[in-house]
Image (cartoon, rainbow, N blue to C red):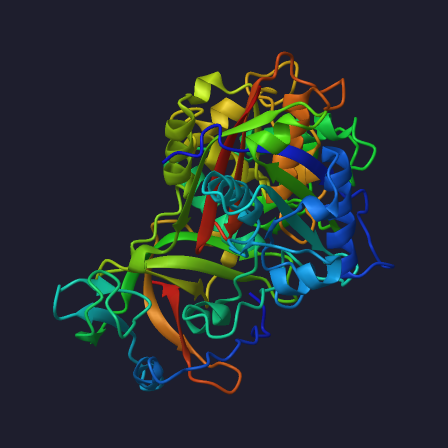
Amino acid sequence: MSIKGKAYIAGIYEHPTRKADDKSLAQLHAESAKGALDDAGLTRADVDGYFCAGDAPGLGPLSMADYMGLRLRHMDSTDSGGSSYIIHVGHAAEAIAAGKCSVALITLAGRPRSEGQATGTAPRATGGGAPDTQFENPYGPATANMYAMCAMRHMHQYGTTSEQLAWIKVAASHHAQHNPHAMLRDVVTVEDVVNSPMIADPLHRLDCCVISDGGGAIIVASPEVAGSLKRPKIKILGAGEAPKHQMAGRVDLTYSGAVWSGPAAFAEAGVRPADIKYASIYDSFTITVLMQIEDLGFCEKGQGGRFVSDGNLISGTGKLPFNTDGGGLCNNHPANRGGLTKVVEAVRQLRGEAHPAVQVKNCDLAIAHGTGGSLGTRHGAATVIMERE
Amino acid sequence: MANEERKIQAPQPNPETKAFWDAAAAGRLMIGRCTACSQVHYYPRAICPYCLSDKTELQQASGSGTIYTYSVMRRAPIPYAIAYVTLQEGVSMMTNIVDCDLDKIKIGQAVRLVFKPSEGGPPVPMFTPV
């Protein structure tokens, strides 16, 4: 069975807050849910499936169903870190195809900025009992230095340069200047990036995403429900997901799980990378984007540095316009999890509702891809391909 | 080189990993080996990640390896180098590169095992350039 054409993205919402001192976590989830339902033209009573991940408070779907007064017949709290919500889109389509629900709500929210988290540079607490913790935490794994080790190896093996990585941030900044909600709206140059302070060699400050509060939500609906709404119909064509880990010590940091999730999604969708008009690519760091672009098949392995250079990711000039909202590098990274906003911007592009300065012409086919967890240890890759009907 | 040493978080051994950390306390680095399928693995575990057999044992590593990749964390009170080192036995492990000029670390560099004390726990295996 395939999910192709079995479900549609009917509603999207990106919470405008970037610092939510005056709001609770549950409140941000619920405000995001309301925003997506309003966007779709649906109400709370229409929701019969709910999806959330580790950022949701308490017992996830139970706590949030309670808070929002949801009556559900399907729930899913798959957690793969920041890519969870891209997985949720695929799972929601599966559930709808199987008749388990007809209107699926996916929410994300978090307050790492209000809570003062040193998100990228301090070792993160991992879940109790994780078997790897005692073999890793003594060495000071943060987020930045894990991705930095991937970049260092990529440079060694393929000759990738800091200047090439910088082009990814430059492209994101060109897009962010048009987004009034973006945290960083100044256009930057390659020199700005490589001259910014070193965080974890070889990643500079401007190679790293922002730390922001925020949230968002997505409504996935059955063809019947989607057909009854007054919004453009965004059809889900294919999805893929895969974990990648240390492979029992056969560590290879040159590729991501996108080598598995990508081909699965493309095969299900029946399209090729060359067909894609717009790409939302998870951008926790510049290296994240570069590796995923290679692994999704937009260029040969090892050629990502050349591919992203000279504005090739900038809408209007480049061959692969990406993250036209400014992405995690400039716009936001709510809850330290950027997967949901990747889907949101892809849907805006497909609807023709992106900012006019960055709207891709005739954008009828888009991809959203994410990496959750850590590229340097274990992560969950997730891909979804969508089409404007 | 900083005179002050970075504080190293103590590993929390559990019943599955106590023997590994007891060996570390005695100055030995162990890797996992499965007697059912003969594969070696790291981190060591009771259930083989290749065949799910419980016929696993600890095998002492030579302590020689090469740097697969590394990064120097600059945004820390005391900068430090995190790395994956590929052991002579073929498995790679997360570790720190210590007792050296952090600016001269290179991928492919030969390193040897040293142990560093942790904060109230067993000593932790790290590596220094040969």
Q: Quadrant of the C terminus of chain A?
A: top right
Name the residue rendered at 76%, 23% in the picture: A355
Residue A196 in the figure: left or right of residue B93: right
Residue A338 percent across, percent down from the top left = 62, 45
B67 shown above or below A16: below
Residue A57 in the figure: left or right of residue B87: right
The residue closer to the viewer here, B35 or A264, is A264
Q: Quadrant of the N terminus of chain A?
A: top left
Residue B39 percent across, percent down from the top left = 17, 62
- What is the number of callouts on the image? 0
Whether residue B84 appears in this view of the structure is: yes
Whether residue A195 appears in this view of the structure is: no
Residue B77 percent across, percent down from the top left = 66, 66
Residue A182 in the figure: left or right of residue A87: right
Residue A104 percent across, percent down from the top left = 60, 44
The residue closer to the viewer here, A235 or A347, is A235
A199 shown above or below A255: below
Name the residue rendered at 43%, 26% in the picture: A269
Name the residue rendered at 61%, 17% in the picture: A363
